[in-house]
Image (spheres, rainbow, N blue to C red):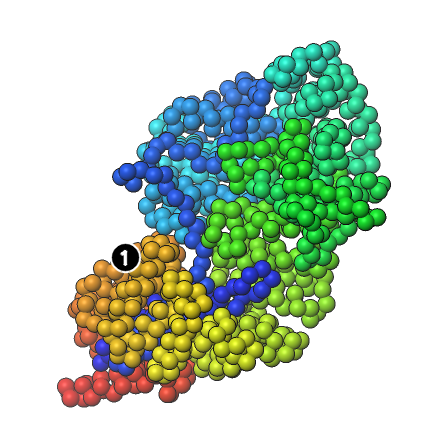
Amino acid sequence: MEDRAGEPDFGGRPTDTGGPGRDPGGADAIQVRNNLSGTVHGAVVQAGSIGTLINHAPPASPRGDVIWPLRIGAVPDTVTAHQPRTALRERIHHAQDSAGTVVLSQVLSGGGGVGKTQLAAALAHEAGGEGTDLVLWANAARPEQILGAYATAAVLVRAPGTAGQDVEADARAFLNWAAATSRSWLMVLDDVTEPAELRGWWPPTSTGTVRAGSGTHRAVITTRLKGADISGGGRRVLDVAPFTAAESAAFLRERLAGDEAEHLLDDAVDEVGAVLGQLPLALGYAAAWMINEDQPCTAYVEHFRDQEQRLVQVLPAGGSGEAYDREVAAALLLSLRAAQAAEPVGLAAPALGLAAHLDPAGHPAELWLTDAVAAHLARARSADRHGAPGRERDRGADAVPPAASARGTGGVDGEGSAVAVSAGTARRAMRLLHRYGLVTIRRDDPQRAVRIHALTARAAREALPAAGENAVVRAAADALLELWPDEDHHDLARAGVLRANVDHLWPLAGDHLWRPGRHPLLYRAGDSHRRNGLPAAAVTYWEHQVGCAERLLEADHPDILTTRAYLAAGYWSAGRTTEAVALSERVVVDRRRVLGDRHPDTLVARANLAAGYWTVGRSAEAITLFEEVLADSEHVFGDQHAETLRTRANLAVGYRTAGRVEEAVALEEQVLAGRMRLLGDRHPDTLLARGNLAASYWTAGRTAEAITLFEEVLADSEDLLGDQHSNTLHARANLAFSYRTAGRGEEAITIEEQVLADRERLLGPEHPHTLHARSNLAASYWSVGRVEEAITLEEEVLADRERLLGETHPDTLTARSSLAVSYWTAGRTAEAVALQEEALAQSERVLGEGHPDTVERLQDLRRWYELNASQQ
């Protein structure tokens, strides 16, 4: 009978990713099943890419308690001359008073520029002033922004089940907390655009703690949309119309008076509101123009009407179907014309065009200090001086700003004389837009300091000459890439905001990020999605980019192959293994044909495919391919290159799990020495190498050395990565395994019960990692005689694996054999023999007669046959 040791603990899809412009490379330890003498399985160490931890630090407190009240997200400031909108507020409060025992979830629906956001902001400020425990404000144009706000809230309120590692898991934990808590809260989702994608993520609409009519729990949603997707689920829709004529006039009077500009008020004050359709946004433009230009209402109306007559050529009738589009655009263009003539002269228009392509929810103010922005503004100013507005020169994908003597300067005009724009001038251009009400600067949120109203952005983009679109898009991409941290985990908040800005940019960019030449931002941003726990978003992103590449480039263009490789990595991270293997095989075939067998890109693709084969149980093919790749990597990269070390580490795991332990130890000692020399003793990749070596020591019978090394790896992982990082959980599971096999079963159970709870919370009950944790715990129960508890867990694991992986997947075979052993121990001998016979037949067919797992299953059956015969 087998002396069972549990299953391998293995992590995510084994890929590692290089810097911008590279596709995923090979990883360290493959997802493995260790096959040990007398065991079904063995210790495993996860290696490969360290995923980026999404950390949201809770507020400091001597006892670690939550400090109430909490404010999450940047609630917009109340605008100057804010109008109370009494009639609308009465409707809102009436709905609140009649909410009864359900959570009041109100949808403020109306067109762009009618003041929905300002109304919601007023409600949020009011709730804060009344002492509401939690006020959460989320920019909701994209679902991931909402999930990010929820995840932040989960950590700050210490919601049960929160780890700060997986965005979706933390978001779910927060909603569960919100539905059960007695704390008062208000959630605002501002500018919902995709209600269908929020299914399952709306704020709760019913709780057991809300007090009738009290507003204890409350949600406010703003959107331009109408229909069942918005009004369902207990949400009450209120239409938000533009100002009344009286409110428009009151706004202008208060706004001008606030700047000591009452002298600009005249008999045309009511007419200003009329020509602007009573839109709050457009009225804000008008007030800023009158104050900056020191012109009265009459003059504004005259200028506006003149501008509107010319607007037909810029915005043809019928645009979006919204009746006020042209009024807002006309007001925008009038304000922009005045700003364009102010200092720094000629830069307001190109600056606004750039801001209009970024996320309306905000971007860092430092973007305006980048070389990319300075160079773009310099080219725009140069083009304007030579009478060619909008005809800016296009830049190649990997081009850099023209050489300059100082940071933030650049630009050369068509005749060779420099038209420099300094970083300070670029920043002044951004502040000029703020002066004229075209953007808003928020000092309290540095990552999203510069914001633009979505309608302003749309009108600015539509007014941009087509000839200048490519230059603006690529300048925005250059600036975002310039701001990106070298590694996302160096500045997680910055990386998240930059990802949001790219997600806004690429749907607007058309083909401009592919022509002329693929922009490197595409690869940097796309891989950031995968590394930061957003696999579904990564797949969506890369499927779109593959479509663009295949449409725009020749069939065998290297960028097509690289983009497909990134999509394959996305499929792996999303658990779509069949699609991942098929696409990885296609990439290898194409790269071999186009680039040759030893080209660096081909080697990376071959290593990815080998790791993929291992993941789906094709271990013999994986080892053969790893051996070939290692030989070629040593020849191409050199013996100590990072790529060579990765391939050597993967091959070592393959050898170990195939029973070639001494070869595995030799390779892993080489990898560890190389990593320590290149990266240092405590780099995440070095920790992975130490864990791999510990697993091989254990397999070779060097138990004490293995346990010591596992303990060191766990301690360093907790210190470096945090208590709940996936690699820390792998290290903890590996240590538990080593304890179990050393006869310390109760210690192993304590650790494994926690690992299973963590994985169920973070990953869900059916994730492969969770199934392995459940199987490991069952093995520990079995080792201390708790056989019935082991059987219950193992039956669950086998059923899940048969359903999720198929009858003959190696992991399914392992689960079947483990359950057979437990049946035998419990005296259910006939069931045990039948199950192990089934596992043996499938193992011979799938793994081969000489595979260690096959041999162990055959030996078990022979012993069981002999015992049955002796008892008859």
Residue 554 occupies quadrant: bottom right
Residue drawn at (27%, 64%) of the image:
711
Residue 428 occupies quadrant: top right
Residue 357 occupies quadrant: top right
Q: Element at badge 1?
A: helix
Type of amino acid at the residue the image marks with label 1: Gln
Q: For residue 331, say whether it is visible.
A: yes
User: How many circles with numbers are drawn on the protein?
Assistant: 1
Q: Nearer the viewer, residue 57 or 102?
A: 57
User: Residue furthest toward the front?
Assistant: 405
Taking the image as shown, residue 74 lies to the left or right of residue 664, namely right
| 544 relative to 505, above or below | below
Q: For residue 805, say whether it is visible.
A: no
What is the x, y in percent for residue 341? 76, 30
What is the x, y in percent for residue 666? 37, 80
Q: Nearer the viewer, residue 479 or 354?
A: 479
Residue drawn at (64%, 46%) of the image:
407
What is the x, y in percent for residue 546? 63, 62
Residue drawn at (43%, 26%) of the image:
127
Label 1 crowding class (10 Å Cα cut-off): few <14, some 14-19, many 20+? some
For label 1, the residue is 754
Taking the image as shown, residue 380 lies to the left or right of residue 538, namely right
Residue drawn at (39%, 44%) of the image:
57
Q: Nearer the viewer, residue 381 or 339?
A: 381
